[in-house]
Structures are given as structure tokens and as C-alpha cells.
Amino acid sequence: MDRARPARRVAAVMLADLAGYSRMVVEDEVGTLARVAAVMASIARPAIARHGGRMVRGTGDGFLAEFPSAVEAVACAAAIQETMAAEAARTPPGRKLLFRNGVNRGDIIAGEDGEIFGDGVNLAARLEPLAEPGGIAISAKVHAEVKGRQPLAWIDAGERVLKNIPEPVRVFFARGAGVAEAEPAPRPRARLAVLPFAGANVLAPGLSWLTAAAVARARRLAVTSTAEAEAFARDPSSLRRQAAAAGLRAVLEGEVVRTGDAVTLSALLVDPRTGNHLAAFRETSDAASLAELPGRLAAAIAERANEADPLASTVPTRNPFAFASLLRALGSRDPEAAMEALEAAIGEDPGCALALALLAHAHALRAEVDPVSLRDAEALATRALSLDTVNARTLACAAAALARAGSDRAQHAAALAASVAQGDGEAQAVLRAAGLLGGQAQGPGVAAAPDDVGNA
């Protein structure tokens, strides 16, 4: 029997997300949730209904809506932004609720439960994080239908390469009547990739992973996820093209050499667009101080990028035996061997929050074959969170484990993780895989970040 074809139609799609939501939830969870609920009930839903749209779903910090007309979708977005701007004018800095809106018109697939899917929705989801807080980002297709029909000034932002969208998309931003003037945006981060370090020993993968985590703490820098960095390393011949698409300003290449008790890490910071060497680093450590090596390298990179503030400590454990086990776990391709190494690290240092969170995450991921693992995951994640509330990767792994275990503490942990993971692509990837983070991977300004890394 042939399966029924999915119901398709062309529609305008608006996707909205509240800027700064995670930070505000961490600062005042109850108050923020109440304010957002009021905005949805008194502003967003009535505006959608007035413009002939349908609220498909609320997402906690935003919503997805469908309209038969691109003109009405944009008019609705502008009306919401105008009302939100008036509210924001009466609100103290840091507490303003402002949406980013993305609008697209295209083919969608209707689900039986009223949900919608398809290319039209996917592109709207990629447009939304490009908008400023209080602003609207639209596709060229929408712009062709709405230009001159509303009191909005449109800025042609040119073609953008968007994640999981096969062709570059021409994007327009709204600035004018009905669009809020946002609070000053934070300075965009310069994005870089820490490629897997070379070296015929178990130390290299773990040291590259920890170096990326340390670099991500810099206010002016952002690092890709491990998977992205590995993809760049697998195809160095096309690195220039990949760098342009990913908005990379630099890549860090390194090699780890062990001679007796001494470990030497040699690294080059390279501009992938030109191949020019921006800086060279060489750090040597013995076993007792090996845990400090990633932080020292990260500090040197941050200094090269004119980072004004010193980086916070990134040492996951000061016990050399626990650190050796942690490196073994990070370098293992065998999940069971990695879990055994993490257990060994915790045995040497029960206060190693990163090892606890990684083990919690590993237990949660194996729950399909061992349901008891969820209980262990929740217990380990809870311990990790009690020990560390500042390390993005610890928080992300713990939050993901709690989410998979069905814990009611997962959302709060995820909000805390998201608030400190602005520059950490790996932490964001963990949260996203667990359904705890929206579509954007870095911030709207990352791809257009200034050339900080190369301009010391």
C-alpha cells in the first residue's frame, strides 16, 4: 500500500526568539518566565491573530507562526517589535525583552498535529539569529513581496552562507518604523578552530579538546565544535573555502611530543584565508603541571587577540593521576574504555566536575541499551553541578544528562550552561543535541567578527 503523501503548501513563516533569555532566566528564573508568558499572551498571540496568522507552537523563549501572506507576516513582526520596543523603553537595561524575528516564504509540510516542517521553516530558523534584538531578518523572496508596502527601511546584507542551507541566501534586515532600537550589542567574537593536535600518543586529542575549552573562555574569541574542527582537519585542501563559509578568522594547529616525563606542545596560529602564520607557541610541561598547559596556550592566544581580561582558571583537576585518566578518556574512541578512564579520574579526584559531567553524559547516551544508566547519569550530573557552575562544557554535559534522564532540573542547568557557552561551540553542540538549545551555533555577529586574532 502506498503511503499518503504529506500535505504541502506554500506559506510565510515567522520564527521569533528572545534575545538574552538564558541570561535573564539564570538571574531571575521565576520573574523572567512570568514576563515571557505575559508577552506571549498579551502581545504575540493577539498580533498573530490580527494578521491572519496561526501560532504553530511556543518554544518557551519564542514562537513559530504561519501566515498565508508574506506581507501580513512582516506586518505582524513589525507590530510585535513596535509594542516590545515601547515596553523595553520602560525597562531597566539587562531586563529588556526583545525578539529576533526571521521571516521566510516557501514550501512547508503540514503534520497531523498542526506542526509544520520543510525548507520554508528551516530557512526562517536560520534567518532569525541573524537579526538584531528588536529587528527582523527576511529572505530575498519575502523582500520582493513586501518592499514599498510597509514603512520599513530594508538593509541589503548580501548573500550569506547559512548552516544546512545548500545555496547562499540573500538577506535583508529591517530598520525603521515599528522596529526597536536594541541595546548596544556585545562586541562580536572572532571565531577560530582548534584542529586535533598531532602526536603519536594518547595525550594529543585530550590536550586539543581542553585547549579549545580554555580558548572559549576569552570574551573576544569563539571556538568551533570538535566535530567541525575535525571536519576541517580531514580536508585541509579546501580549508580556505570552509573557513569563509564558517566565518573562521584563524585555526590552531599543534603537535604534542612526549620525551620522558616532559610534554612539549608546539602550535601555530594560521589565517586559513591566506595561509599566513599569525603566531607560534611552544609550551613544555612535566606531569605535575600538565593540567596547566591548555590554559597557558589559551592565554597566549587570547593575548594575541588583544584580550583585556585574564582568562579564568581552566584546570579541571590538579591531581596528575586524575588528569592523566581524563586525557585517556578524551582520547579514546571506545565508549566503554572512555567511561572506565573517567571512573578512574573520579577515583583519583572525586571533585573533578568535568569528569563527573562527561561520565554522566556517557551514561545518558547508553540508556537505550541499559536503562539503569539514566539513574547513574542523573546522580553524576547533580554532583558535577554542585561542584562547578562556571565551566561551559561541564554545565552542558550535566544539563544534557539531566534532560535525557527526564530531570526537572535540566532546563535551569541548560540556561546556566547557555549563558556561559557563548564562545564554546562544543558546549553548544552538546546542548543542541539534547534539545536544549535553539538553531544558532554562535551569535549573529560571529561570522562578521573583526580580525582580532591577526591584528595584535
Image: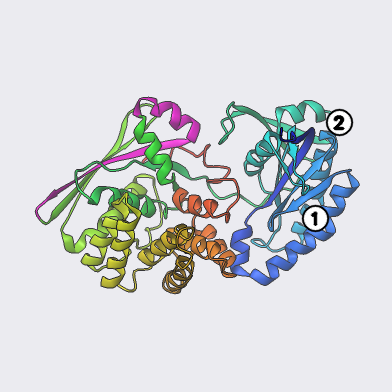
Instruction: State whether residue 218 is above or below residue 139.
Output: below
Q: Is residue 239 magenta?
A: yes
Residue 159 in picture, x, y percent from top left = 61, 27
Q: Residue at x 11, y 57 (%)?
A: 261
Neighbourhood count class around disc 1 (C-alpha, 10 Å): few under 14, some 14–19, many 20 upward:
few
Q: Which residue is mark 2?
A: 149
Residue 108 in picture, x, y percent from top left = 74, 35
Helix, strand or loop status at disc 1: helix
Q: Quadrant of the C terminus?
A: top left
Neighbourhood count class around disc 2 (C-alpha, 10 Å): few under 14, some 14–19, many 20 upward:
few
Q: Residue at x 42, y 55 (%)?
A: 217
Query: Can residue 315 be spotted in the picture?
Result: no
Instruction: State whether residue 170 is above or below residue 195.
Output: above
What is the spatial separation of the Cα atoms under label 1 and label 2, in whole angstroms? Answer: 23 Å
Q: Which residue occupies the foreground of this view, 103 or 176?
A: 103
Helix, strand or loop status at disc 2: loop
Residue 286 in picture, x, y percent from top left = 15, 58
Q: Residue at x 85, y 38 (%)?
A: 72
Tell me the kind of residue under disc 1: Ala
Apparent side of residue 394 relative to residue 282 in the rendered image (left or right): right
Q: Which residue is mark 1?
A: 86
Q: Give the label on residue 18, or none.
A: none
Q: Which residue occupies the foreground of this view, 50 or 450?
A: 50
Magenta range: 236-260
